[in-house]
Image (cartoon, rainbow, N blue to C red):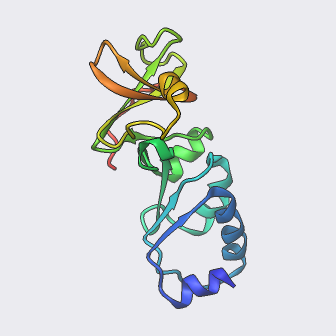
Amino acid sequence: MFYDLVFQKRVTILSQTPSAFKEFQNVDSQKKKQLSLKYVVFGGEKLQTSTLIDWYQKHDDTEIKLVNMYGITEATVHATAKILTQKGILENKNSTIGRPLDDLKIYIVDSHLNIVPDGVIGEMVIVGDGVASGYLNRPKLNSEKFLMLDDINERLFRTGDLAKKIVRENWNI
């Protein structure tokens, strides 16, 4: 069983999709074992943070850190990271993707690619060294997805994902 392997091998960092972790969490809730985990990194699909409430009934958020990552293949897989806390999950059950990784910037734009004010929903675009140069032999798709944004004078990738920027206290990532 996967859970037993993680325990036996004293795994310290586990990368999981949220749906796979839900199964891991179900087994964990029935075991009395002390895991060696220090980090669980989520990626690959949207995380519903409300599914982690039971995890925090057994595990303190200082012993095992849960990290939600958002990303796409066109931006070197991961683009943002957010360390989750029990308090944050209890206060806001929505998925949060955190801040951009060091080599990337995230902007929220309207349909004309103008940057929208904080708190306004728009399309998320990714800019930076981690963004691919385009799709091989797909000029039409490249012209739709990889564009120049006048405000920043850099090539960007249009994710197609809707988001809004929420300005909060400084996060430690």
Residue occupying the far front of the picture: 137
Nearer to the camera, 157 or 28: 157
Quadrant the N terminus occupies:
bottom right
Nearer to the camera, 42 or 131: 131
Quadrant in the picture for residue 63: bottom left
Residue at left offset 48%, top offset 22%: 143
Nearer to the camera, 24 or 73: 73
Residue at left offset 66%, top offset 48%: 50
Residue 102 in sight from this viewpoint: yes
Left or right relative to 35: residue 23: right
**Residue 34 locus on image (x, y percent):** 54, 83
Q: How many labels sit on residues?
A: 0
Residue 71 in sight from this viewpoint: no
172 over 65 or under it: above or below? above
147 over 65 or under it: above or below? above
Residue occupying the far bottom of the picture: 8
**Residue 70 locus on image (x, y percent):** 50, 45
**Residue 26 locus on image (x, y percent):** 72, 70
Quadrant in the picture for residue 12: bottom left
Left or right relative to 140: residue 118: left
Residue at left offset 69%, top offset 73%: 29
**Residue 95 locus on image (x, y percent):** 58, 41
